[in-house]
Image: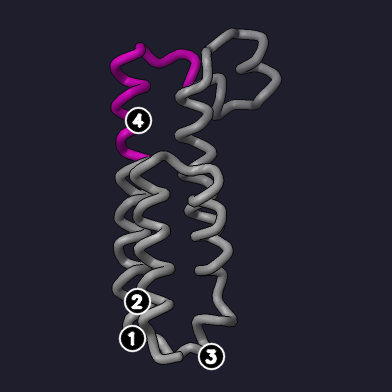
Amino acid sequence: MQILQQHFQAAQQLQAPATPAAAAAAGTAAAAAASLSPAARQEAVAAHIAALSAALGALSTWVEWVPMRRLAASPVLDACAFFITAGTAGLRMQALDVLRQVGRGNL
C-alpha cells in the first residue's frame, strides 16, 4: 500500500504547477520535478500511473484466488477506497473492478 501511495503522490507532485518556492517547501522530490521539462513531466506522470494501473490489475487477479480471511486482513479494500476517491478516472474504474472481484469472490 505504501508503494502505491508513493507512486500516487509522485504523480500528483508532477502534475502540480511548478513554482520554485512551492518546490523548495515540498522537498527534494518536488524540486526535482520542478526542474523537468513539460514533456519529461508528462512522461514521468504516465510512468507512475502505469505502475499504479499494473498494481491494480495484479490486485484484481489476486482477489480472485485469495481466501476471504486473508483479503480482509490486507489493505486492499482501503487502497481501492483511496483510488475511488482520489484517483484518475482510469484508476477509479480499476479499483471498482477489484471491488467487483471481491464481491464475486468466495464470500
Residue under label 2: 62
Residue under label 4: 44
**Residue at point 54% right, 39% down?**
9
State how far apart marks 3 and 1 are (Cα). 12 Å
Image position of 107 with respect to 2: above or below? below
Instruction: Categorize mark 3 by other alpha carbons within 10 Å: few (<14), some (14-19), many (20+).
Output: few
The residue segment tinted magenta is: 33-48
Would residue 63 be found to the left or right of residue 28 on screen?
left
**Residue at point 53% right, 68% down?**
77
Of the numbered discs in the image, which one, if any, rests on residue 2? none
Nearest to N terminus: mark 4 or mark 1: 4
Q: Secondary structure at mark 3?
A: helix
Viewer-side residue, 18 vs 94: 94
* In the image, residue 40 lies in the stretch drawn in magenta: yes
Q: Secondary structure at mark 2?
A: helix
Amino acid type at image mark 3? Arg
Amino acid type at image mark 2? Trp
**Residue at point 36% right, 52% down?**
93
Q: CB atoms at circles 2 and 1 under 8 Å apart? A: yes
State how far apart marks 4 and 3 are (Cα). 37 Å
Residue under label 1: 65
Prevailing SS of the magenta stretch: helix
Image position of 59 with respect to 83: above or below? below
Nearer to us: label 4 or label 1: 1
Image position of 95 with respect to 72: above or below? above
Residue under label 3: 69
State how far apart marks 2 and 1 are (Cα). 6 Å
Instruction: Categorize mark 4 by other alpha carbons within 10 Å: few (<14), some (14-19), many (20+).
Output: some
**Residue at point 30% right, 62% down?**
57
Instruction: Categorize mark 2 by other alpha carbons within 10 Å: few (<14), some (14-19), many (20+).
Output: some
Nearest to N terminus: mark 2 or mark 4: 4
